[in-house]
Amino acid sequence: MWYIHIQQLNASLSKKTQRRRPNFIMSNSECVVVSFGCNDDGQLGTGAKRRPTLAIDDVSASNFPQQLSNLQDKDVVAVSCGSRHTMALTASGAVYSWGWGSMGQLGHGDLKSINEPQKIDFFEKEGHMVDYISCGGCHSAAVTNDGTLYMWGESHWGQLGLPKEYDAAHESLPVKCPMPEGEADEVIVKVSCGGTHTAALTSLGHVYVWGRGDSGQLGIGSAWLKDPENESLMGASRPHLVKGFDGEKVVQVACGAFHSAAVTEQGHVYIWGKEDYGMLGVGQSSDQQIPKRLDYFDDIPVLCVAVLYFLLVPGIFTC
């Protein structure tokens, strides 16, 4: 559990919070969702846009937590922030989205941006309850309670992992992402959307990746810098299994802008992707094309890893 003290928000983070860009959304123990930070595209969900509490260089923003009244009675259990859009998941399995929508990343069937939370009707109409959500740079993902993965938003880099018949530059409604046939009863349980790539975690601890890979962020080796199905794509347009975890079961995976990380059942941390400013922590200056174990944490079991620039939560915490 993380404890945070803000003058206008004296609450503990007892539920899930995901941060990516300058906007910050959190839900506290009483399911009150608040937001603050950049609001150029309505990603704070307060109903305001270009009416800043704080203005710096014509940037619309808020430097004080503001409650999202539209979610007040929705029992929000998870929030995910993308580059310029946001999603919230409720206890009943409904998904709400808001912010920049020009790539279809809001999932409402259009390319409009909205400045207040709006339910994604697709899942309710199809009778699906969502268990997990993730926002990426300009794409989004959700895992339903039957282990099915849905993707939508920008697809230029293959980050949606869709078949060839989906050749549009973006998808404005959730589309089922076909996964390679795994072992019996193996289903998707978690997903993480990076800047232009995606990773999914299965119930057996396997990690699948797809999307842009020119910085090694897919973790499947330099041989995959060109997709055999699409030679113009620097990466993989379909999900591929990541190897190199020394046979350990992965329990959590996180994607950043150009790098990725995973935590195993033993509490070991693996990292791969673009090496900039030492963000991988592997003591080298070149990109890491396959997962590399961070020996530093061998005696400090890690439960959770979050990747934008890089954050680790040691085993003395829960999340």
Image (tube, rainbow, N blue to C red):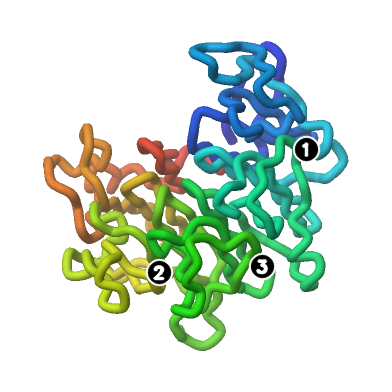
Q: Quadrant of the N terminus?
A: top right
- Residue at 71% in and 40% down: 114
Q: Of the residues shown, which amino acid type is indicated by label 2? A: Tyr
Residue 149 coordinates in the image, percent (x, y): 58, 69
Q: Nearer the viewer, mark 2 or mark 1?
A: 2
Callout 3: SS: strand
Disc 2 crowd rating (10 Å Cα; few below 14, some 14-19, many 20+) is: many
Image quarter of residue 94: bottom right
- Which tag is nearer the camera, tag 3 or tag 1? 3
- Reply above or below: 233 against 38: below
Pointer 1: what residue? Answer: 31
Going from N to C along the chain, the mark reached first, 3 or 2, is 3
Q: What whole-number distance in Å separates the C-alpha atoms at marks 3 and 1?
A: 21 Å
Label 3 – label 2 distance at C-alpha? 17 Å
Q: Residue beneath label 2, please?
A: 208
Q: Which secondary structure, mark 1?
A: loop
Give the CA distance from mark 2 to mark 1: 32 Å
Q: Amino acid at mark 3?
A: Thr
Q: Position of residue 75 (x, y in %)?
A: 81, 45
Secondary structure beneath label 2: strand
Q: Residues within 10 Å of mark 1 (few under 14, many from 20)?
A: many
Looking at this view, is 211 or 72 the one in front?
211
Is residue 240 visible to us here? yes
Q: Of 41 and 212, which appears nearest the observer? A: 41
Q: Is residue 5 left or right of residue 76?
A: left
Q: Residue 231, image x and y in percent?
A: 25, 71
Instruction: Choose the circle earlier in sequence order: 2 or 1.
Output: 1
Residue 245 makes an appearance in the image: no
238 versus 318 height, above or below: below
Q: Residue at x 66, y 31 (%)?
A: 44
Residue in view at x 74 percent, y 65 percent: 123
Which disc is residue 144 wearing? 3
